[in-house]
Amino acid sequence: MNILKKTKGLLIAAALILLAAVRVVAQDVTFTAQAPKAVVVGERFRITYKVDTRDVKEFRAPDMKNIQVLTGPATSTSSSTTIINGQVTNNATVTYTFTVVATEEGDVELAGATIKAGSKQITSNKLTIKVLPPDQATQASQGQGGAQSSNRQSSGQGSQTVGADDLFMLATVDKTTVYEQEAVLLTYKIYKLPSVDLQTMSNKMPDLKNCHVQEVELPQNKEFNLEHYNGRNYQTMVWAQYVLFPQHSGELEIPSTPFEGTIAQRVENNSGDIFDMFFNSTRYVEVKKDLTSRSIKINVKPLPQGKTSAFYGGVGDFSISSTISSTDVTANDAVTVRVILSGTGNLKLIKTPEIKFPQDFDIYDPKVDNKYTIKGGRQTGNKVYEYLIIPRHAGQYTIPALEFQYFDPKSGSYKTVKTDEYTLNVAKGQGGGDSQGSVSYVSKEDLKFVGQDVRFHATPLRLKSDSSNFYGSALFWLCLALPVVILAVIAAISRKRVADNANIAKVRAGKANSVAAKRLKVARKLMKENRKDQFYDEMMRALQGYFGDKLSIPVAELSKDNIEAELKRRNVADEPVRQVIGLLDDCEFARYAPGDDTGRMDRLYEEAAHVISQIENTIK
């Protein structure tokens, strides 16, 4: 009986300890609204409101102007519980769904919906929906009836064709008249009808001369959005964007750029075989589609007169500020003047400004830290310049303000901004002189002559020769020459290393294999985790990075054609070149192709390792 009581007590204690260890994680309540960015007038779509708690009361939808509610709100709930390290997380979601139709064209703005969760009233985000007009081609076909459609299908060859208006690439710029060094945003956008099943898309970099180009980083997971263009409703996606900085005045031409797409095209089997008709008379084949964007001409105006010595090539909108590490120092102390140039414009192309420091200062080359990004199609951020100076003599010095002149394209005029001026107080260093290690000057009053400090000694000094002395021996001369030899060897090695590092292309080529090996290692890890998209992205980065570094091809010119031409120029055999191009094609295609991803990823990984090894053995 006592044993049962003790056992019962232990179980209760263990349960209490377990309950004390379990903590329920409370989450902040979020309430979000979701709807398509663009819809077609008269077509149905859904508006959903989600709240991550079940304790919901008094749901109130906003006033939906120009939107007709067909059904709703339909309410659904879902919940889940997870326990990690003794922490219990309860996830619950309540969803309100409306099925609606937009009745008028234009932009529809919906205010946030409101709910009461517990004792708090929460408002969701607002929604902006672009309502597009109907597709003119669809309206025309509906007006003509289904007879023509039936005749078109019967008279055709049983296959679906994709015309020039069904799928195309459109190149646009945000402005066609600019000044030198003024940023231009170049956008390549895909337009396709919803019926076109686009599988892959690839392109060469546009060949832009007399222009500095910087590619805009876009999300890897690109999405199509609905857009009305030339009377048709297309699914559109921004494929690539570049920020251009024209370097010379005159006419800048952006040439037409080729693109290559792969579409899944439907082919109907009209053979009349009853077996094929019973199971499936339609099949899909992959067809390549060549697209070419139109050329664009931009008028580049020269910068007007009015430049001063304070102009360092800045075009845009900038501000400048500065700080100093200390204004009270001793001689030989290092002082840092920090200048921050902020704004939007051609930050990458601006030269380093010069500060006129006092002549008896030791001045070192400034350190430049670039902290700019591409945002909204513009290069924005700041550049930080750190000037290191060392005053060698005591005194009071003036560090003048730094003037920075830039050209503002919006106003069409030059503007000047400047930093603060600093007064630097330099005290004497140790030892009473200007600084440690410098010459100390002594006045005549500090010298006293003592005539009898040195006296003549009559005892002659006898020198005795000792052949065992170290001085003058072979070992003495060897020890004396050894440091000189070591220094000479170190200097020769250092010069060679500096020369090798100065050759950037050689350094990149030497490190290409090791960099590619690291990326392939990451790709192998992604393959084991069966992360398909990330694996193919990493494989493409590994291959493009390797061939760009190994063959010294700039990123802006990195393409399959350029890689093939450079390999042949370096006398690489046709078979390895064919394997390289085939591998790049397979990596581009594999991400979107259905099939056994595990086997395909393993095969591509092995082929990449083999191809890189072949090229390494061929190009030394």
Image (cartoon, rainbow, N blue to C red):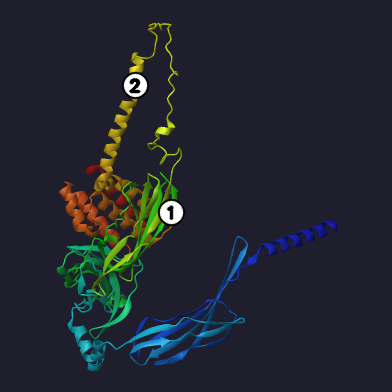
- Vertical placement of residue 400 versus 416, above or below: above
Near-viewer residue (27 or 420): 420
Q: Amino acid at mark 1?
A: Thr
Q: Residue at 40% across / 5% down in the picture?
A: 462
Q: Is residue 51 left or right of residue 441?
A: right
Question: Residue 333: x, y in percent?
Answer: 42, 46
Q: Residue furthest right?
A: 1
Q: Who's the residue at 82% across and 56% down the image? A: 3
The residue sitting at the left extreme is 250
Mark nearest the camera among 2 and 1 is: 1
Residue at (38%, 44%) from the top-left corner?
A: 393
Lateral position of residue 1 relative to residue 376, left or right = right
In front of the other: 273 or 597 = 597
Query: In the rendered image, which residue does mark 1 sit on?
Result: 327
Quadrant position of the N terminus in the picture:
bottom right
Quadrant for the C terminus in the image:
top left
Q: Which residue is mark 2?
A: 480
Residue 243 appears anywhere in the view: yes
Dot 1 alpha-carbon crowd within 10 angstroms: few under 14, some 14 to 19, many 20 or more: some
Disc 2 and disc 1 in contact, CB within 8 angstroms: no
Residue at disc 2, secondary structure: helix
Q: Quadrant of residue 191?
A: bottom left
Taking the spot 33% from the left edge, 18% from the top edge, the residue there is 477
- Residue 487, horizontal then vertical, whole percent: 32, 30
Residue 524 showing in the rendered view: no
Q: Which mark is residue 254?
A: none
Image quadrant in which you'd find residue 315: bottom left
For badge 2, the amino acid type reads: Leu
